[in-house]
Image (tube, helix red, strand yellow):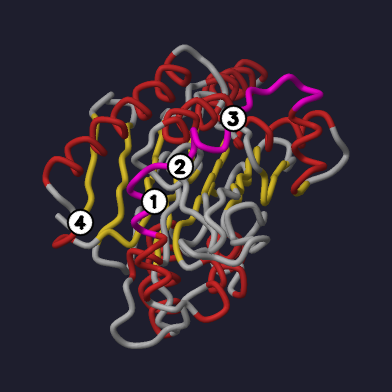
Amino acid sequence: MKRFISAIYLALSVSALADAPVTLVLHGGAGIERKKLAPEKEAACRKVLEESLRKGFAVLKEGGSSEQAVIASVMVLEDSPLFNAGRGAVLTRDGTVEMDAALMVGSTGLAGAVASVHGVRNPILLAQQVMLKTPHVLMIGKGAEDLAREQHLRFEDPDWFITPEQKERLERAKKKDLPKGAYVPVPGRDVSLLIGTVGAVALDRHGNLAAATSTGGLAGKLPGRVGDSPLIGSGTYAEDGVCAVSCTGHGEFFIRNAVAYDVAARMKYAKATLTDATHDIINNKLKKLDARGGLIAVDTKGNIATPFNSEGMFHASMGPDGVVHIAVFEE
């Protein structure tokens, strides 16, 4: 009998030590319109997404944490002028760049976030410092920038962040006369001005989850506006044993509906699958509100979900098989 019990204990121990199916999922923003996406722009974005995916997945493959992986991936996207985060972030109505970012670690439940920061090359690194070096979750503006200097994070001149594409985007936004710095859901609006964010979610070999999100916000937004990306539970959430989520979309709706946490809550309390929870929120709950956007998510078993209700969303994933998946539109 003792041998039988020992054998069961050993089997359970081996099972517990077995590697989880390492998985990484990225998004480069929803709101993509097929007729406005030039083939060369799509090819360039796919190339950066693959670079970001491979960089983050290499961390996981080498035994690194999900936290390290999502940061590595998001930094690549922040440094690219092709996405609305870091360099290439959209401009406020005043023509400035104000950036938001968040990081949450599922194993500890700890999180860090920053909002309305200027000059910090990689806001996701600053979000990590808020989590690691302060007792706070969210810091904004000058206080967050002072922390970045204390931690010797890299800064860039204001012009480094501003691209010709975003200057043109701001002019389009001004011509639309955006009410109070952001769109309201009215027929015929230019969805491409509404949204755009980057994010990553990961499951490491120890079964730990993490989520990271970074954005410049809405084109033509009022200075000081903060969206869902840096708000834990709205645009970013991770909880071991459940899921990790990063959202992209019209942030005001994602805030009011606590979208990222809603995914986890449905899974925990209603026993919904990752697919059912995410698709119902994006394609039913938000769509009924005429709220455009999407999200990426991964659960503790390595299942992924990438629903969106706009025409397109840049998204990419890689699992234990090491195969790169990159898509923009429903395929």
Q: Amino acid at mark 3?
A: Glu
Q: Are marks 2 and 4 in contact (CB under 8 Å)?
A: no
Circle 3 or circle 1, nearest the eye? 1
Magenta region includes residue 239? no
- The region drawn magenta spans 149-169
Distance from disc 2 to disc 4, alpha carbons, whole Å, reads 27 Å
Magenta region includes residue 165? yes
Q: Are marks 1 and 2 in contact (CB under 8 Å)?
A: yes
Tell me what residue is drawn at x 33 percent, y 64 percent: 192
Badge 2 is on which residue? 162
Tell me what residue is drawn at x 41 percent, y 60 percent: 170
Q: Relative to 40, is 183 on the left or the right? A: right
Badge 4 is on which residue? 329
Percent across and percent down for residue 283 are 36, 73
Circle 2 or circle 3, nearest the eye? 2
Query: What secondary structure is found at the residue carrying circle 2?
Result: loop
Distance from disc 4 to disc 3, alpha carbons, whole Å, reads 28 Å
Badge 1 is on which residue? 166
Badge 3 is on which residue? 67
Q: Are marks 4 and 3 in contact (CB under 8 Å)?
A: no
Q: Amino acid at mark 2?
A: Ile
Crowd tier of the residue under label 3, counting other residues whose Cα lies within 10 Å: few below 14, some 14–19, many 20 or above: many
Query: What secondary structure is found at the residue carrying circle 3?
Result: helix
Percent across and percent down for residue 124 are 60, 35
Circle 4 or circle 3, nearest the eye? 4
**Nearest to the observer: residue 155 or residue 57:** 155
Kindly indicate the quadrant of the structure image that contains residue 55: top left
Distance from disc 2 to disc 3, alpha carbons, whole Å, reads 28 Å
